Image: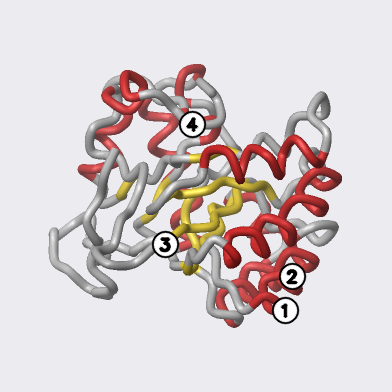
C-alpha cells in the first residue's frame, strides 16, 4: 500500500501538491497517464478512451513530444488534458535543482501546461519551491496502478485500482512500453468497473498560465476544485 496509495507522511513532504480532487455531491476520479506519448502505445489508449467516452490527463515527456508532435497534437485534438513530466524524465532526487528546473522549462516550451508531475514522484528541496515560483502546479496521485511492474500480473494491476480508488482519486497509468502488457488489460476493465461503481471521469483542473517574466495571467482556464489528502 505504501506504493499504491502514498501515505500521509509522504504527502506532507509536498503540502502544496495536488493528490486528490473532490467535487461536492459528485463521485469523481481522474485518469492520468505518464511517460508518453509514443506511437506503440498512446494511439491504443486514445482509442480506448474514445470508445469509453472518457477524458484523461497525459503527463508528457518533452523529448517524446519533440519526436512525435503529431501524437501530442492528437491528444489535444481529442479533448484530453496535458501536463509536464520533464524533458528527459529526470528524477529530482538524482538531479541538481537548477538542471531539474531547466529541463522542466525545456519541456514546457513544447507542452505549454502549468500542470507538472515529477518522474517517480521524487523531488528534493528546493525543487518544489522553484517549480511553484515558475508557475507550475505539482500534481501527484492518490492511486498508482503499478502497471509498469513486470512482477505484477495484469489482474493484480486491475485489483490495485479496485482496492485503492476512492472519491476524488487521481489514478496513474502509463502509456509506455514497460507498462503496455498490464495496462492494456487493466485500463478498459478499470474504466468499466469505475463506471459501474458510479464514478464520473474528470480532467485534472488546470491552473491559469502565469508569465514567468511579468507575473501576468495570460491563458486563464478552469479553476482548481477542492482538494483533500
Whether residues under marks 3 and 4 lie with C-beta atoms below 8 angstroms apart, the answer is: no
What residue sits right under mark 4 in the picture?
Answer: 5
Label 1 Cα neighbours within 10 Å, binned few <14 / some 14-19 / many ≥20: few
Image location of residue 91, percent across then percent down: 53, 26
Of the numbered discs 3 and 1, the one sitting upstream in the chain is 3
Whether residues under marks 3 and 1 lie with C-beta atoms below 8 angstroms apart, the answer is: no
Locate the C terminus by quadrant.
top left
Q: In which quarter of the image is residue 117?
A: top left
Q: Which mark is residue 48?
A: 2
What residue sits right under mark 3 in the picture?
Answer: 28
Q: In which quarter of the image is residue 140?
A: top left
Label 2 Cα neighbours within 10 Å, binned few <14 / some 14-19 / many ≥20: some
What residue sits right under mark 1 in the picture?
Answer: 51
Disc 2 to disc 1, C-alpha distance: 5 Å
Of the numbered discs 3 and 4, the one sitting upstream in the chain is 4
| Residue visible at 79% across and 40% down in the picture | 155
Label 3 Cα neighbours within 10 Å, binned few <14 / some 14-19 / many ≥20: many
Secondary structure beneath disc 2?
helix
Label 4 Cα neighbours within 10 Å, binned few <14 / some 14-19 / many ≥20: some
Position above or below: 162 against 188: above
| Residue visible at 75% across and 50% down in the picture | 186
Amino acid at each position: 500500500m505504501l506504493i499504491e496509495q502514498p501515505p500521509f507522511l509522504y504527502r506532507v513532504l509536498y503540502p502544496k501538491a495536488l493528490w486528490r480532487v473532490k467535487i461536492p455531491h459528485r463521485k469523481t476520479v481522474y485518469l492520468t497517464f505518464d511517460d508518453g506519448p509514443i506511437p506503440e502505445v498512446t494511439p491504443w489508449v486514445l482509442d480506448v478512451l474514445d470508445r469509453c467516452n472518457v477524458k484523461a490527463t497525459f503527463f508528457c515527456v518533452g523529448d517524446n513530444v519533440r519526436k512525435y508532435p503529431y501524437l501530442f497534437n492528437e491528444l489535444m485534438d481529442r479533448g484530453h488534458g496535458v501536463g509536464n513530466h520533464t524533458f528527459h524524465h529526470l528524477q529530482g532526487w538524482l538531479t541538481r535543482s537548477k538542471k531539474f528546473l531547466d529541463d522542466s522549462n525545456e519541456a514546457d516550451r513544447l507542452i505549454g501546461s502549468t500542470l507538472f508531475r515529477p518522474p517517480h514522484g521524487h523531488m528534493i528541496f528546493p525543487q518544489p519551491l522553484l517549480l511553484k515560483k515558475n508557475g507550475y502546479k505539482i500534481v501527484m496521485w492518490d492511486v498508482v496502478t503499478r502497471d509498469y511492474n513486470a512482477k505484477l500480473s495484469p489482474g493484480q494491476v486491475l485489483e490495485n485500482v479496485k482496492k485503492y480508488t476512492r472519491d476524488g482519486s487521481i489514478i496513474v497509468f502509463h502509456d509506455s512500453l514497460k507498462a503496455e502488457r498490464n495496462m492494456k488489460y487493466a485500463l478498459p476493465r478499470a474504466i468499466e468497473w469505475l463506471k459501474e461503481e458510479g464514478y464520473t471521469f474528470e480532467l485534472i483542473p488546470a491552473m491559469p498560465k502565469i508569465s514567468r517574466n511579468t507575473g501576468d495571467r495570460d491563458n486563464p482556464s478552469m479553476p482548481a476544485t477542492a482538494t483533500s489528502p
